Image (cartoon, helix red, strand yellow):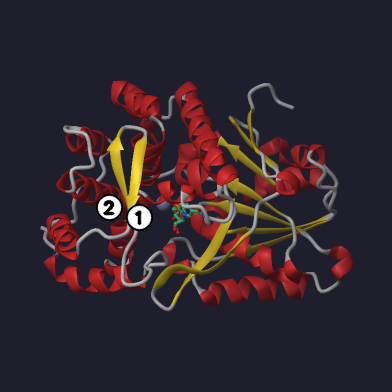
Amino acid sequence: MSPMLTRVEVALGARAYSVLNGSGCLPSLGSLLREHGLQHSNAFVLTNPQVGALYGASLEAALRQSGFQRVVFHEIPASEEGKNWEQFSQTCASLLHHFPDAGASPLVLLLGGGVVGDLGGFAAAVYRRGVPFVQVPTTLLAAVDSSVGGKVAVNFGGVKNIMGAFSQPRLVVCDLDTLRTLSPRELRSGAAEVIKYGAVCCGSLFADLEAGALERLLALDSETLVDVVTRCVRLKAAVVERDELDKLGIRNVLNFGHTIGHALELSAHYALTHGEAISVGMVAATHLAERLGVCEHGFLQRLEALLQRAGLPLRYSGHPELFEPMLRALQLDKKFRNGKNLFVLPVRPGEWQQMEDVPWPLVHEAMHAALS
Ligand SMILES: NC(=O)c1ccc[n+]([C@@H]2O[C@H](COP(=O)([O-])OP(=O)(O)OC[C@H]3O[C@@H](n4cnc5c(N)ncnc54)[C@H](O)[C@@H]3O)[C@@H](O)[C@H]2O)c1
Ligand SMILES: [Zn+2]
């Protein structure tokens, strides 16, 4: 194995897997698959036109070099609009069309960001009641968050991620060099999830970001990139290991900023990226935490300063018309239960608590602030 790879184990017993990160590892993907016991001769690669054009050939060459015979590509549209039932259904149709024989079932490879990873992971989870899949994340967001943990889903009926499953990948391999072609906006979007980890999972990450790691990350400094991505993956793995199926409340921590963030993302019809919406959502949740007196004094300012340095929005100003649609979206949220939303509230960097009975007037206030 290349000495440049870092490895994080996600210790889930029979479903355990490794997350490998390193520069320039895409050409070695085939041998990495073999080393991890994936001896298939066929591959089904899900990607989108943008990522496929950049990295499809390199991935295919890597697979062929290690003896893959058939490599079938299927593309879904770039962006969140592609994460829908129709694209999911077309992906399943393509799987069935190309691999009708159960004896020649392919290894599914998900080359792209969170949209490809979530939709393709869901297709792999249900096709023939589950075929092995490997996440090959190419966005910062997917590298630090969505490729790890086994939550796979598509949006449906105007609700984010409402149709989905828990299905762990067999391996995650991220070639950090692929992040170099991301647009600055997509890079910043991924930084929002990095800041999320610092804010509620790890005080020392938060402090390091404040001390300059954020700028080095955004400048794609190699050492910082591998350090930050690996730390985030470790944090995610630790949460997932303790609450794989999101039943114990532990995994809710990863939802910081996502209650209002998801409602905004949907109501604004994806005019904001996921990370941008989550940035606004984190500020709104922290505003709530301050009003409820659960948050350390000064935390909101520190968080806002960090998000601003990352070029992320603190609010979605000038959109008061989104208040009502957001309110409806909040009530359709996956985590909306018995008339209440679940809020993850920061306490101090690296600490959080959840609250189910945040008074609606306070939620309204935070939403008005987010849209004004
Ligand atoms: N499953 C989970 O646990 C989890 C966690 C967080 C987020 N998510 C989901 O992830 C999705 C967001 O993921 P995302 O931010 O990766 O978005 P994305 O998949 O839409 O990718 C963003 C854009 O970047 C482009 N792109 C991808 N890789 C590139 C590269 N290397 N070079 C140039 N362009 C590239 C894509 O074509 C796309 O236009 C959301 O749907 C969100 O709900 C899931
Ligand atoms: Zn997210």
Q: Please tell me which residue lies in front, 82 or 209.
A: 209
Answer above or below: position of 292 versus 318.
above
Q: Is residue 346 left or right of residue 162?
A: left
Q: Secondary structure at mark 2?
A: helix
Specify which label sits upstream in the sequence, 2 or 1.
1
Label number found at residue 281? 2
Amino acid tagged 1: His
Is there a contact, CB below 8 Å, between mark 2 and mark 1? yes
- Pinpoint residue 90: horizontal percent, then vertical percent: 61, 75
Residue nearest the observer in this picture, 116 or 355: 355
Q: If the image is split into quadrants, where does the C terminus sit?
A: bottom left
Q: Nearer the viewer, residue 235 or 338?
A: 338
**Residue 227, above or below 115:** above
Q: Residues within 10 Å of mark 1 (few under 14, many from 20)?
A: many
Amino acid at the residue labelled 2: Gly
Image quadrant in which the N terminus is located: top right
- Residue 258 shows which numbered tag? 1
Pick whichever, 80 or 234, lies toward us. Answer: 234
Task: Identify the residue at horizontal 73%, vertical 64% (top origin).
Answer: 130
SS assignment at label 1 = helix
Q: Does 371 sit left or right of 228 as displayed? A: left
Q: Is residue 119 above or below residue 349?
A: below
> Is the residue marked 1 within 8 Å of ligand 2, measured from its CB?
yes
Q: Residue at x 29, y 25 (%)?
A: 210
Distance in Å between CA atoms under marks 2 and 1: 6 Å
